[in-house]
Amino acid sequence: MDTKFFDSLFEGDSANGVKLCLGLTGGDFWTRISGCQNLYRGPNSETIDFDTILATRQVVKDSITVPAFAAHQSLSSYVYVLRRANICGQEELTFRAVVKVSFDEQGNLIEPGCNEVFALTARQVAGPRVRLLWYYCSMGQGAEPVSFNVYWDGGTGEVDYEVASGRLDYTGPRYYSFETDVLTSDSYEFCVRAVSKDGRESNDLGSVRIQIRYSVPESVGLLHANVV
């Protein structure tokens, strides 16, 4: 069990301990034998409070509800992260399940208007650089995009959704491509989001990762064939 889950001091009755049912073991042992999903929140992706669990659900569930005590302020944004813990109480350390929500002056949720991009792929080209390719379909969209924001992890393993590494104008439903600058790390992860006229982004969580090759395999020398 991860150290942060131990709750012996409160005998499993702290806020986190109650959500994880640790009171059954006095806070000393993991009780979620089927694993679980824990919800965390922060004002941005760099300041997520991973010490405070907002809600917990079974791994098999495909949705989770933000509790009433986790209030939202008007004209504010929040980043929610969902992380899974396994049967031994070891939690993943990824940002693969993350969503950003924003609220207007009346405290109402601002719904994203653009569709998500489709079929995002990455291919290494000369440089070495990476060329991203994706398709945007306008069918059923709530708002038309004006551009696309390209996000990446800079080779760190965690995508920075606060600062876009590139931007591409929207010119209608079609395929789009974007090429990076010269790269130096071994692998990179990218995500592309459509942006509406009022600055709202689509909630794309899908990303693509690519391994970079910096050396070309040597060619095969002269091949001989003998009759035996």
Image: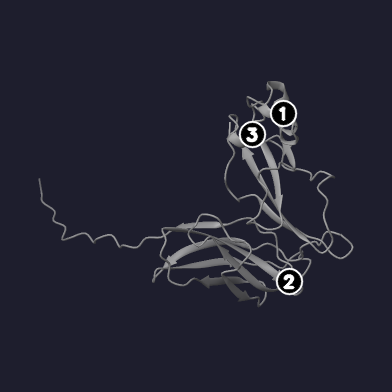
- Residue at horizontal 59%, vertical 38%? 91
Distance (Cα) linking label 2 and label 3: 39 Å
Q: How many marks?
A: 3
At mark 1, the secondary structure is helix
Depth check: 122 or 42 in front?
Answer: 42
| x then y, percent, for residue 185 | 42, 61
- Residue at horizontal 83%, vertical 45%? 69
Going from the N terminus, do you reach mark 2 or mark 3 first?
3
- Residue at horizontal 83%, vertical 51%? 71
Q: Which residue is mark 2?
A: 199
Marks 1 and 2 close (CB-CB < 8 Å): no
| x then y, percent, for residue 53 | 71, 41
- Give neighbour class at mark 2: few <14, some 14-19, many 20+ (Cα, 10 Å): few
Distance (Cα) linking label 3 and label 1: 12 Å
171 up-or-down from 192: above or below: below
Check disc 3 and give the amino acid type.
Phe
> On the rendered structure, is 10 left or right of 191?
right
| x then y, percent, for residue 54 | 75, 43
Check disc 1 and give the amino acid type.
Phe
Q: Which residue is mark 1?
A: 10
